[in-house]
Amino acid sequence: MWTNAGALRDDALVDYVQKLAPQLKQMTIFPSEICNYRCNFCHIWGDTGWALKEPQRVIREQLDIAVLKRFIDQVAAVNRNVGVILTGGEIMLYQHFEELVSHLRSKRMNVYLLTNGSLIKKRINFLIENVVICNISIDGPREYHDEIRGKGSFDTICDNIEALLQEKKRRKKMFPYISINMVLSPTNYKAAKDLIPSLRERFKDSTIILHDTKNPWMKKRDIAVNFSPLLYTTPERGQAYAKQMKEHLNVDVSPAWQGFVEEAIDIDTQYLKKDLQDIWAAEGVDYSDYVDIHDYYTDIHNVFGRSKCVAPWHELIIRRTGDVYPCVDLPDYKLGNIYENSYEEIWEGERAATFRDYLKTDNLMMCNRCTRLFADAETF
């Protein structure tokens, strides 16, 4: 669960960003956005997702592995301890998945997968040898998950997790850590309280804990479970973002922001708040610093002390076309393209500097409910 800002908050965080020097700590790569699921709330393939508007283009475009490896080499030559998030779509549908992961590991970069879990069984040995964390999406107990992702998908994913757990135990391996993430949406929020019990029933011989954001590694576990709020914006803020990008940064935005628009969020937020507090209390997790979920869904202006985003100083986002962006979910302000530009040209270029300078004094209208705004500057 996301937290309120820590010591760096409000004006202190604004002051911190004024003096912040760029230092790459993380890359998020979308080498392909092909997916085998159609989750209804997904901002890519969901009911309002942008990929549905141009599916053949998405299927056709995948990153050239030679070009991607060349860019990774440039990054590795001048940076240490860079973590890499691989996502999609479903990341394991990328045609060069294993070659990409192997190359990242050869450059001593830690690899973190965001996956729907449907294809794990085919790559168990490879994942054990090369991946630090598999972050798997499960949207509640079987009936809720299958309603969102398709009949039979819950059992498929759990069977795959079981196979991975068994092989890890057989080989006495620690990695990859297995993290299950439930996004709290109108479709499933009433099942939040039932998720951990249902997983403990399914994985009777495994230790399942609730992820503790403040103390993530304190407890032994086979599986950690996390609850995440739905990312969203309002039509008014989305339209204001498009106008802002054009008038202030001379950018015509993509349709991506429309995938986050919620006219109204049909969640009984007080009901959800009580359920989450009951879960945290039962699992022994101190939730005093967690965001108030009622305020999160009902007051989009409340950023919980997170007055600035530091991601553009620490992260690059690479999309399937080779375009590089500072924002993880909004392919709008392009810094460059790995087919045409070097890492140095992109990271230290004029466009990157302009964007960082703009964010020192302004925020984007889409920032308020973005994952990166809720990443602590101290631990990014």
Image (cartoon, grey):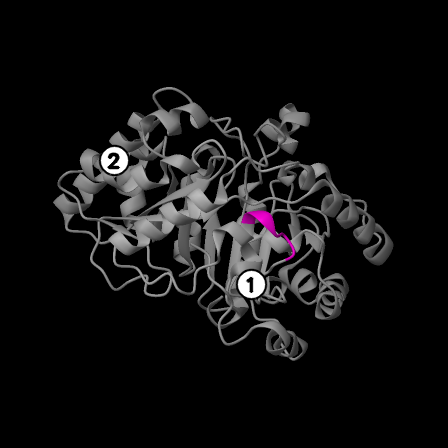
Side of 185 relative to 129 (left or right): right
Within 10 Å of disc 2 (Cα), the crowding (few <14, some 14-19, many 20+) is some
**Vertical arrangement, residue 189 with respect to residue 380, above or below:** above
Residue closer to the observer: 126 or 228: 228
Whether the magenta-drawn stretch holds residue 296 is answered as no
User: Which residue sits at x=68%, y=67%?
Assistant: 348
Q: Amino acid at mark 1?
A: Phe
Q: Label 1 vs label 2: CA separation?
A: 32 Å
The residue at the point 17 percent across, 40 percent down is: 166
For the point 61% across and 47% down, the residue is 329
Magenta highlight range: 297-301
Give the image quarter of residue 153: top left
- Camera-nearest residue between 240 and 83: 240
Residue marked by disc 2: 198
Q: Position of residue 70 (x, y in %)?
A: 56, 53
Q: Confirm whether residue 189 shows in the render.
A: yes
N-terminal label among 1 and 2: 2
Numbered disc 2: secondary structure: helix
Residue 10 lies, in percent from the top left, at 61, 72
| Residue 99 appears in the figure | no
Q: Is residue 299 magenta?
A: yes
Q: What residue is disc 1 on?
A: 304
Tally the marks: 2
How packed mark 1 is, by other alpha carbons closer than 10 Å (few <14, some 14-19, many 20 or more), is: many
Q: Position of residue 343 (x, y in %)?
A: 63, 60
Looking at the rendering, in which quadrant would you find the N terminus? bottom left
